[in-house]
């Protein structure tokens, strides 16, 4: 059974159609690269799939649990939103232990996991400093650890590498691959296309709320009729262009 | 599984949130000091009174708890519910780190955690006074059961206030989020609600205004907490009521808790309706088409029908428009100011009505209070209001322009209105034309001062958001300290000037009292022990002399010298604080 599945999933904000009849089917242990221009509806899709907002119509499920069943959903997912959800007055340690406590994780093992993750992300030295004094990247790292701490079945990462230095960004990419190897499904939204090319098994491109292309990176960058290879950036620009001519070209590609 | 653990998690959320607010408070030293005073002084006063009257208290005769006490408890309870509801609606209907909390635990757990946190905050604040009262009950009134029952009554009071207030608050927040009508008119509706609540509160608190007494509220069952609190002491309550209030509170907690759970489960997962989307479609498309910066001044459009005059430079105009727009779009600011207006205004008005001197009091009151109000409208928290934009503002505008921009709205829009209203109030007053004119000039002078000094005060005591979550959030209310400092700087000298103008004799008596006789009386009271302490009586004598000297000053002299000094002081103060604000802005380092 797919870990993430949606059918005709739709979200409307007043006049704005943020997500338009989205059909997804993402299997266990895969990394799904979710691309799209600003305002395409990526964050909205994640909020729908994490139960934070209700769909206008359509259905979806995570690990077999319908996305409208929030209580059932919660143990299966981890979410790193665009804006790291942290408490300024707490230290990284305090925040992570607090969240672990709320999730009822076993204390000893979690402690070790927190330490390992902090180490891997070079955050140990600052883990006892108040988050109010953190840089953007440090916040991002803390929020990332928080999202994967409980080893959920599905992790939603909204721009996980934003604000990270090259070393940290590399670490996160490796961590994502490790997560997938251990069976976690990673739903990844980012504007940094090389990251997607490196880690994603499947790429979906969203434009104006609609899924305009889906496939593994190799297939997407192959031009069927000529056999040339394009970059993912070319594909992205073509598929999401507002110029109708480009649309035509893209659909017959 | 989750069903069994949620109370434990709610408790840990409550404790965590409470610790967070303590830490935040700890960093805000001015507010901390103010709260500490608010907490310690009543307790110390109670303690002092107890010690002084220990014997009298010990020998107190039995008597029945009067209805007035029950009514008073009920009144405070109702007011508490209003305050909590207002906190929920205006400060934080949505939660911090929302996406984290709601994907980690159930909404119910978060809701109950927040209730616990709020109770802890109240109890932390009231803990010391409760301790003192319990001590008095146990040791002086000889009532060992008070050791348990008094704190129980206090906790029940806090818990029911929080639960009922939150249930009301989330219901209102839900209404604002779902009804476009309410969303659009929330400023006016909110102001009306505040006026009603405050008005009701003061009507009962000052029975002389309305003839209503607190006893009229004794039927409200929550007042029976008084019966519970006095069990075992010489004050005799009704034991039926004491038992009843425990059962009643329990029922209220359950029903209120269920309500809060339902409301938050909906509220935290919906998108609030936007107050602006209701406009006609054609209007919206027209707006979109015209949105090119070159063809349309959207900021000026946002503040219409008000127009910032073009004689100021563009940066000043922009800052002024921005300040206007913020004030218009943020209802909290006005509500925040209404509390002191009512606290001070209603007893004054009630006295005036009773003594039939409403006309005589109205004009000077207008001349002093309105300038204060306008002065605190636009710049009580300018830096905090900038939010994430602050670094940009700091690098984009000069301090001179910025501060002038903050001053302009009050002068351009406030001043004419104040002059007009004060003039009208003067016409219906018993004062001579000369005095009326004086009051109008005074109101203008005070407006200039109040408006000019506010940026410096607002910048000295800024309030910043603790954290911004993805959802849009309302502008923060200004810091209490800033409002208080500004009020003291405007209202006290303003009142003195008004009094010197229309009632110099009263002004002289009050001055003599404040600087001479009141300290004298206090010192003499302190010195009432049989073999008085020398220093205290010497000091008392010195103060008495000061008082007598003030009374001996001629009224003309007082008006010219006292008034003149105050007027010049005001101008100096404005100049210095204006410079200070410019300086602060230019050197400000955002956190
Ligand atoms: N709470 C909301 N209320 C109204 N409209 C919204 C809301 N959230 C999102 N939208 C609208 O839905 C559309 C999709 O927004 P979304 O945040 O999902 O885009 P995104 O793909 O994440 O963009 P970005 O790459 O900039 O993060 C946008 O048009 C946005 O204006
Ligand atoms: Mg987004």
Image (cartoon, coloured by chain):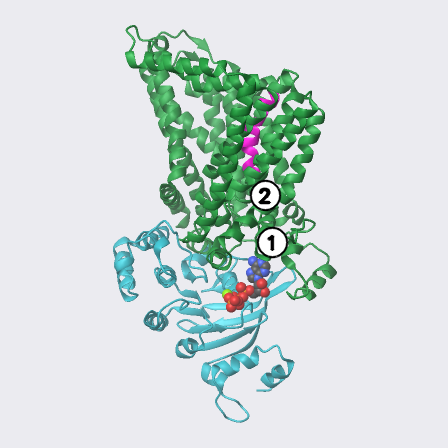
Q: Please determine if labels 2 and 1 lie on a single subunit.
A: yes
N-term mark: 2 or 1: 1
Q: In this rendering, which labeled residue sits more in front, label 2 or label 1? A: 1
Asked if residue B284 is positioned above or below residue B538 in the image, the reply reads below
Which mark, by number, is residue B317? Answer: 1
Given residues B373 and B255, the one toward you in this image is: B373
Residue pictured at 68% horizontal, 28% vertical: B425
Identity of the residue drawn at 32% across and 72% down: A167
Q: Chain of mark 2?
A: B
The secondary structure that most of the magenta stretch takes on is helix
- Tell me which segment is drawn in magenta: B334-350
Q: Residues within 10 Å of mark 1 (few under 14, many from 20)?
A: many
Q: Which residue is mark 2?
A: B331
Residue under the image location 42 percent in, 39 percent down: B116
Q: Position of residue A59 (x, y in %)?
A: 56, 64
- Residue B125 appears at what percent x and percent y? 39, 32
In the depicted structure, whether residue B577 falls above or below residue A237: above
Letter of the chain that mark 1 sits on in the rendering: B
Mark 2 neighbour class, 10 Å CA radius: few under 14, some 14 to 19, many 20 or more: many
In the image shown, does B501 or B172 lie closer to the viewer?
B501
Q: Is residue B95 something one can see in this rendering?
A: no
Q: Colour of chain A?
A: cyan
Q: Residue B430 occupies which quadrant of the picture?
A: top right
What is the spatial separation of the Cα atoms under label 2 and label 1, in whole angstroms?
A: 23 Å
**Discs 2, 1 touching: Cβ within 8 Å:** no
Q: Tell me how many marks there are.
A: 2
The image shows residue A192 at horizontal and vertical percentages of 44, 74
Chain letter for the green part: B
Image quadrant of residue A23? bottom right
Residue B576, visible in the rendered structure = yes
């Amino acid at each position: 059974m797919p870990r993430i599945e949606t059918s005709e999933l739709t979200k409307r904000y007043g006049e704005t159609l943020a997500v338009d009849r989205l059909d997804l089917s993402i299997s266990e242990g895969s990394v799904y690269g979710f691309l799209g221009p600003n305002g395409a509806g990526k964050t909205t899709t994640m909020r729908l799939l994490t139960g934070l907002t209700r769909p206008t119509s359509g259905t979806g499920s995570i690990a077999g649990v319908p996305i409208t069943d929030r209580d059932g959903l919660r143990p299966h997912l981890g979410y790193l939103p665009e804006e790291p959800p942290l408490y300024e007055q707490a230290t990284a340690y305090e925040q992570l232990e607090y969240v672990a406590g709320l999730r009822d994780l076993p204390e000893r093992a979690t402690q070790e996991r927190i330490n390992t993750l902090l180490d891997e992300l070079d955050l140990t030295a600052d883990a006892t400093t108040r988050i109010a004094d953190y840089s953007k990247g440090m916040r991002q790292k803390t929020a990332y650890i928080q999202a994967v701490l409980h080893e959920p079945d599905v992790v939603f990462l909204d721009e996980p590498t934003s604000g990270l230095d090259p070393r940290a960004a590399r670490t996160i990419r490796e961590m994502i691959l490790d997560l997938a190897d251990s069976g976690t499904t990673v739903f990844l939204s980012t504007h940094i296309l090389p990251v997607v090319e490196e880690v994603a098994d499947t790429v979906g491109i969203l434009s104006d709320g609609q899924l305009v292309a889906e496939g593994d990176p190799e297939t997407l960058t192959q031009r069927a009729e000529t056999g040339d290879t394009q970059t993912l950036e070319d594909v992205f620009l073509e598929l999401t262009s507002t110029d109708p001519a480009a649309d035509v070209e893209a659909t017959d590609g | 599984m989750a069903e069994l653990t949620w109370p434990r998690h709610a408790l840990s959320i409550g404790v965590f949130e409470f610790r967070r607010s303590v830490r935040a408070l700890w960093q805000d030293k001015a507010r901390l000091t103010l709260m500490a005073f608010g907490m310690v002084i009543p307790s110390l006063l109670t303690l002092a009174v107890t010690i002084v009257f220990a014997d009298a208290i010990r020998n107190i005769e039995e008597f029945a708890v009067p209805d007035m006490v029950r009514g008073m408890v009920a009144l405070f309870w109702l007011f508490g519910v209003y305050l909590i509801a207002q906190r929920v609606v205006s400060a934080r209907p949505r939660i911090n780190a929302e996406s984290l909390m709601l994907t980690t635990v159930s909404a119910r757990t978060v809701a109950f955690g927040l209730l616990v946190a709020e109770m802890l905050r109240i109890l932390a604040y009231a803990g010391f006074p409760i301790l003192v009262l319990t001590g008095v009950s146990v040791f002086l009134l000889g009532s060992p059961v008070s050791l348990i029952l008094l704190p129980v009554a206090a906790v029940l009071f806090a818990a029911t206030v929080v639960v009922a207030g939150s249930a009301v608050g989330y219901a209102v927040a839900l209404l604002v989020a779902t009804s476009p009508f309410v969303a659009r008119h929330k400023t006016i509706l909110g102001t009306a609600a505040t006026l009603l609540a405050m008005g009701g509160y003061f009507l009962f608190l000052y029975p002389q205004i309305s003839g209503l007494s607190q006893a009229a509220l004794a039927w409200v069952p929550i007042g029976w907490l008084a019966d519970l609190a006095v069990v075992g002491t010489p004050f005799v309550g009704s034991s039926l009521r004491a038992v009843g209030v425990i059962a009643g509170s329990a029922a209220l907690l359950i029903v209120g808790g269920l309500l809060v759970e339902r409301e938050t489960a909906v509220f935290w997962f919906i998108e609030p309706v936007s107050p602006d989307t209701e406009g006609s479609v054609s209007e919206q498309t027209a707006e979109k088409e015209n949105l090119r910066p070159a063809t349309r001044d959207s900021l000026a459009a946002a503040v219409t029908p008000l127009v910032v005059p073009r004689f100021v430079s563009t940066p000043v105009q922009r800052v002024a428009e921005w300040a206007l727009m913020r004030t218009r779009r943020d209802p909290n600011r006005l509500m925040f100011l209404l509390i002191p207006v009512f606290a001070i205004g209603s007893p004054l008005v009630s006295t005036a009505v009773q003594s039939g001197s409403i006309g005589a009091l109205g004009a000077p009151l207008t001349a002093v209070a309105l300038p204060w109000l306008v002065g605190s409208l636009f710049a009580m928290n300018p830096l905090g209001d900038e939010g994430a934009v602050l670094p940009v503002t700091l690098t984009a505008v000069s301090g001179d322009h910025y501060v002038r921009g903050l001053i302009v709205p009050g002068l351009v829009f406030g001043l004419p209105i104040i002059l007009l209203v004060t003039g009208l109030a003067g016409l219906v007053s018993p004062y001579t034309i000369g005095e009326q004119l004086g009051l109008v000039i005074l109101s203008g002078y005070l407006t200039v001062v109040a408006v000019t000094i506010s940026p410096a005060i607002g910048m000295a005591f800024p309030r910043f958001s603790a954290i911004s979550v993805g959802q849009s959030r309302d502008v923060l209310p200004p810091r209490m300290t800033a409002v208080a400092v500004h009020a003291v700087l405007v209202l006290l000298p303003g009142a003195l000037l008004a009094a010197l103008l229309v009632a110099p004799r009263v002004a002289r008596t009050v001055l003599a009292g404040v600087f001479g006789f009141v300290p004298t009386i206090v010192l003499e009271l302190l010195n009432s022990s049989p073999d008085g302490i020398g220093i205290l009586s010497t000091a008392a004598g010195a103060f008495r002399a000061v008082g007598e000297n003030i009374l001996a000053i001629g009224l003309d002299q007082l008006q010219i010298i006292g008034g003149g000094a105050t007027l010049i002081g005001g101008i100096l103060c404005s100049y210095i604080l204006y410079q200070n604000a410019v300086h602060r802005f230019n050197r400000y380092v955002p956190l």
